[in-house]
Amino acid sequence: MLSAIVLVPSQTVRVSARPAAEALVRTLSALVPAAIEGVLRDVIIAAATGVAGLEQIADHAGCGLEDAAQPRDALCKALAATREANIFLIMAGRAPETGFAEELAELLGDGQNRARMRDRPGTLLTRIAPGLAPAAALLAPRDVLLKIADDEMSRMSRRLGSAPSLRCRARRVD
């Protein structure tokens, strides 16, 4: 089983609170099948302090909320609050494609606990070379994520080092 953390990025917060909340709801709804299948044990939202409506969303979704002045600090608090040692970290505004829960379960069953999920290719370059698409989510042990914690998924992905890319992609839902 995994714990999931949905990171509300600082760029979304700067624009306005409403898009951050809507993106979060769409991401959380995409995680429901993984929770039903028993792949995700718990979900925690990590966000900068002051994003309106997050408490209500967390309450309705039945997940935790960790906030701090900086998104990186909120992520560290969320990592400390997770129940499982392996974490699926995803950016708010991204929704995994159908089948991601099965792929994660298969990966964990094979004894692997590191992977990255990339955005669905959206440009000609990323269609030609899908490995160049930015990371939208990471699977990693909690202690590794604590060492590489950042509010930018791209930096965390680089710091994660070698890890396979999942076949499933994430689509933008914000």
Image (spheres, rainbow, N blue to C red):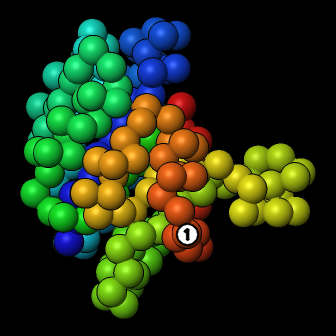
Q: Residue 15 at what x, y percent from top left?
A: 52, 10
Residue 29 appears in the figure: no
Q: Residue at x 51, y 52 (%)?
A: 159
Q: Residue at x 35, y 26 (%)?
A: 71
Which kind of residue does numbered mark 1 sit on? Answer: Ser
Q: Is residue 130 above or below residue 170?
A: below
Badge 1: residue crowd in 10 Å (few <14, some 14–19, many ≥20): few
**The one of 28 and 137 positioned closer to us in this rendering:** 137
Q: Residue 25 at what x, y percent from top left?
A: 35, 35
The secondary element bearing badge 1 is classed as loop
Q: Which residue is mark 1?
A: 162
| Apparent side of residue 165 relative to residue 44 in the rendered image (left or right) | right
Q: Residue at x 41, y 70 (%)?
A: 114
| Apparent side of residue 79 relative to residue 89 in the rendered image (left or right) | left
Q: Residue 10 at what x, y percent from top left?
A: 45, 21
Q: Quadrant of the C terminus?
A: top right
